[in-house]
Image (cartoon, helix red, strand yellow):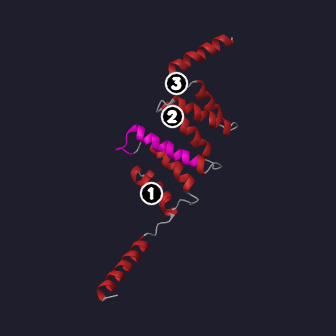
Amino acid sequence: MNQKQFTYSILALIFLLISFGCQSKSDRDYFDSAKNNINESKYVEALNDFESLVKEFPNSSLAEQTYFEIGKLYHGQVVKNLSKEESLQKAIENYKVVYTKFPESKSAAHSFFMVGFIQANELNQFDSAEVTYRAFLEKYPDNEMAISAQAELDNLGLSPEEILKRKIAESSSAK
């Protein structure tokens, strides 16, 4: 190895050491930073922190909660350069990660329900919503949101006015 190659090797090594040395954020650091950004209404920065957390620490104990938070942020359509549909699709993707990768977590059932809710009430994807709600009821029949899932199924595709008319007709016939 000549002097020039040796110098380049040393410079490359120094660059690598500096790069790895500067990356000292832990999963908790990312999570706390994201929560602080949410409190300060810095939603894009919060998403960046959350997404960095799951990218750099995919097996973190905070991953399940992080995917749920990402889903909520995209559901809230906080990224202005994304269309409503793109944002809602990203919410669905992240909610699905929660209940598929962490099926026993405290957020799994809520995430599952939210996928159906977004499909039915915000994207008007009634066939997909029906499949999701039925799967929810099969997996979580005793969950506190099972009644809501069944109500969503019973009223799928109906406008609020149509639901009200149905309720009035049901109460009239019950008398």
Query: What amino acid is labelled 3 in the image?
Result: Gly
Q: Quadrant of the C terminus?
A: top right
In the displayed structure, would residue 12 be above or below residue 37?
A: below
Q: What element carries label 2?
A: helix
User: Which of the 4 quarters of the picture holds residue 7?
Assistant: bottom left
Q: Is residue 41 visible?
A: no
Residue ID at (65%, 49%): 104
Q: Is residue 39 magenta?
A: no
Query: What amino acid is labelled 1 in the image?
Result: Asp
Residue ID at (29%, 85%): 4
- Residue labelled with disc 3: 157
The location of residue 113, given as percent across then percent down, is 58, 38
**Separation of disc 3 and disc 2 at Cα?**
11 Å
Residue 4 or 111: which is nearer the viewer?
4
The location of residue 99, given as percent across then percent down, is 59, 46
Residue 103 or 107: which is nearer the viewer?
103
- Residue labelled with disc 1: 49
Q: Nearer the viewer, mark 1 or mark 3?
A: 3
Q: Which residue lies furthest to the front in this view?
A: 1
Q: Residue 119 carries which label?
A: 2
**Is the C-beta separation of discs 1 and 3 under 8 Å?**
no
Q: Is mark 1 on a helix, strand or loop?
A: helix
The location of residue 125, given as percent across then percent down, is 49, 31
The location of residue 72, given as percent across then percent down, is 49, 45
Q: Is residue 88 visible?
A: yes
- In-image side of 86 versus 101 (left or right): left
Magenta segment boundaries in residue numbering: 79-98
